[in-house]
Amino acid sequence: MLRPRAAVPVMVALVGAIMVACAYQIGDNPSNEPGAQDATTQDENGRAVAPGVVRERERTPSPTPLPRDSEGNVILPCNDILVPVDKEHRLPADCTPAELVALPAYAVNEPQYLTPQAADAFMVMAGEAEALGLEFYAASSYRSYWEQADIFASNVEQHGFEEASRRSAQAGHSEHQLGTTTDVVTPPTWSLSGFYGTPEAEWLANNAWRYGFIVSYPPDSEHITGYIYEPWHIRYVGPEVANAVHHSGLTLGEYLHAIWW
Ligand SMILES: [Zn+2]
């Protein structure tokens, strides 16, 4: 058994080793998330990059490669709210959020589910917006892999594959499968297309980050995100990361990629 005097340095060394090990894990520890700072650095293309992104790049020099499916898509780990889900990176089919809660009835136009953290943040945000005379409701929140497969197939049937791919994600490639993402609508149209140009859309673009949400597919970004401008589609990443994304000038996908690779 260690004598107390010897145990102290051993403990210090152990804690130090654990801290170093944690620093090289990606996206799984909120305390390692990039800080909320203004963009003061530039990337190799001269674009503004939040200092947090640069730090993440420096401390993840050789991340463990993730597995790929037969079509070459990277398969992301399940239950990490910062995974970069996009057209080349997908969730496993059986990936479901660890916990989902129903939003209170007045926040929805049909039963909607989000992770507890995202649901709480959404309710606070919607409540504060309401106090300003703005009204929006969760219209489509958590969707399983199979629900997404049905939606995409239906869109292909209606619009053809190319157009469907601009407006919806294939199964496994949707942020809605994370349980942290919701589409919102507002009266009087109660429709996604009716959300364009509303005061609510403008308010969310400017303020959702304060509550931990980001509009994933901003205007004039289809060449980056692969999706049309969707002012109604907001994803929860936590206030710290949302702050950094908002001030980075990057899309959410670009920012998350910078964290991961
Ligand atoms: Zn959406």
Image (cartoon, helix red, strand yellow):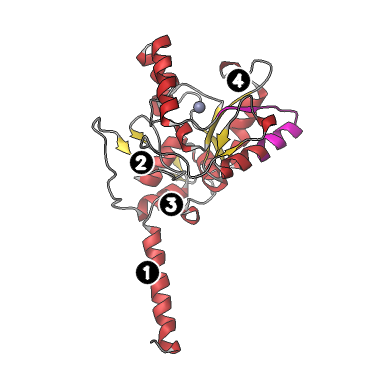
Q: Position of residue 92 (x, y in %)?
A: 35, 37
How far, Cα to Cα, is label 1 from label 3?
A: 17 Å
Q: Which mark is residue 195?
A: 4
- Judged from the image, the secondary structure of the residue bearing numbered disc 3 is loop
- Judged from the image, the secondary structure of the residue bearing numbered disc 1 is helix
Q: Assess disc 2: are there few (<14), some (14-19) or many (≥20) residues with their C-alpha within 10 Å of its C-alpha.
A: many
Closer to the camera, 17 or 139? 139
Which residue is label 2 attached to? 76
Image quadrant holding the C terminus, namely top left
Instruction: Magenta stretch: give its range.
Output: 124-140
Left or right, residue 17 beside residue 34: left
Closer to the camera, 48 or 109? 109
Q: Residue flagged by tag 4: what amino acid is it?
A: Phe
Q: Residue flagged by tag 3: what amino acid is it?
A: Asp
Which residue is label 3 attached to? 28
On the question of residue 8 being in view, the answer is yes
Q: Residue flagged by tag 2: what amino acid is it?
A: Leu
Which residue is label 1 attached to? 17
Q: Position of residue 206 (x, y in %)?
A: 61, 33
Q: Assess disc 4: are there few (<14), some (14-19) or many (≥20) residues with their C-alpha within 10 Å of its C-alpha.
A: many
